[in-house]
Image (cartoon, rainbow, N blue to C red):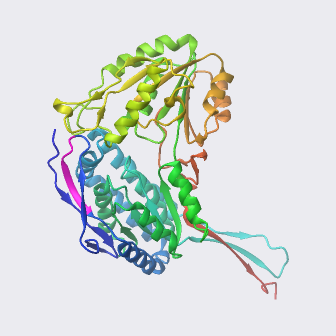
Amino acid sequence: MATTMNLDEHLLIGGSWIDATGGARFDVTDPGSGARVGSVPNGTEADVTAAIDAAAAALPGWRSTPAIQRARILRKAADLMRERADLIATTMTSEQGKPLAEAKGEVEYAASFFEWFAGEAERVYGQIAPPMNTNNRVLVLRQPVGVVAAITPWNFPAAMMTRKLGPAMAAGCTSIVKPASATPLTAALVLRCIEDAGAPAGVVNLITSRDAGMVAKTIFSDDRVRKISFTGSTEIGKDLIRASADQVKRLSLELGGHAPYIIFDDADLDEAVDGLIASKFRNAGQTCVCANRVYVQRGVYDEFLKRLVAKVDAFKVGHGLTEGVVIGPMIDGRAVDKTEEHVQDAVAKGAKLASGGQRLTGGEFEGGAFYAPTVLDGVTNEMQIYYEETFGPVAGLTPFDTEDEAIAFANDSIYGLASYFHTKDYARLMRVAERLEYGIVGANAGIISAANAPFGGVKQSGYGREGGSVGIDEYLDVKYVLMGGVGTV
């Protein structure tokens, strides 16, 4: 199915939707067909500075807006996203590729962050601490950190943005958003919902640009930007940590993952197969929390492999707007190249192709970036796919014998974002959950993300948490006030 939409968007700076300085634009294309979806301005350094100016000017008024009013705006924005879900989801599928049903699910997920943090806005409480002597009083205040920059990825162009903007707006911060250049149209539609919900001019600002380095440099060199939230690769995250040093900017970093998925021999195998499929093949395997290393206890290995292959072989692959498709295109040809490289390396080193294993070209796949959903039997630690994140629709299975061995395999990674396991033994469930060195653990579940839960990693998967009751803390400063001379009269 060819994309038929033509959506030309603009920058949002200080409440005005405008073109970039100089008027340059770039096209957004459909990874399922190569067709043009629309275009956005190619923002310049002057545009980024103007967005920071607008956010800084709006900050005093927004942080002094009563929390209940900020909450009303967030709830209204969530309502508008749901009302416009068809347009937002169709746009997302057209520029990102995921099947339309998944895109609609992401719109709902994205809206839930606005709802959740509307509630958190109303509960940013301080403290009155016990004084050390009768003449003093101790107050602890929680106040907005200031202007925030949100740098968001292409794989979840709505949800990764609202997961940052929800708590920022709730806390009383103003923001500049830089979406991935592959998926800027979804971002623009979500920001229109925020604007139409009544957010004052400058509270949220949108910069689209192909020059991500320029945007980052401008943001990091301006001392008015006090906080940056970034979702992306570990390599870029490390660059941002270095860039933050000069002004000691606060960072939240959700970086790379390489999630283990463990199936013990006492697991419900049907539940485990469905859980793995939900984790591994959602968004064509292009999620930071998707399963990358699948460890199956030897006693159930062959049966699990058989059940998994039967379901993967039945997947319908195609354009995300085609009815019944469950695996859409990858984001671009380079992503397909990496997936193909990992599969070919694994096969050359002894893994067996149990399903898939090839690019899909010609016919309905013409012009798109498609790779067949793939299952590899007998992955070992000599293979690239074992120690590198594939970010593609490939499940590589490795057998194990004991619980200790599975834990050792799972923890043998520089990453620590998400992990998963299946067991019916609830003593084991608690024990394994505690031993896995990951910020997120899915026990008998393959889908783990929710607005009411803290999302984030350990080790080289980053730091800070998004979502849950702690998510708003990333956007608040703690201020201690000692009041002297207030003893009894």
Residue at image point 50% right, 17% down: 378
Left or right side of 404 for 461: left
Residue at image point 49% right, 32% down: 292
> In what quadrant of the picture does the N terminus appear?
top left
> Does residue 221 lie above or below 372 as drawn?
below
Quadrant for residue 6, please give it: bottom left
Q: Is 72 colored magenta in this rendering? A: no
Quadrant for residue 361, please give it: top left
Magenta span covers which residues? Answer: 33-40
Front residue of 427 and 278: 278
| SS assignment for the magenta stretch, majority | strand
Q: Position of residue 96 (x, y in %)?
A: 30, 46
Q: Residue furthest right?
A: 133
> In what quadrant of the picture does the C terminus appear?
bottom right
Q: Residue furthest bottom?
A: 489
Residue 86 visible here: yes
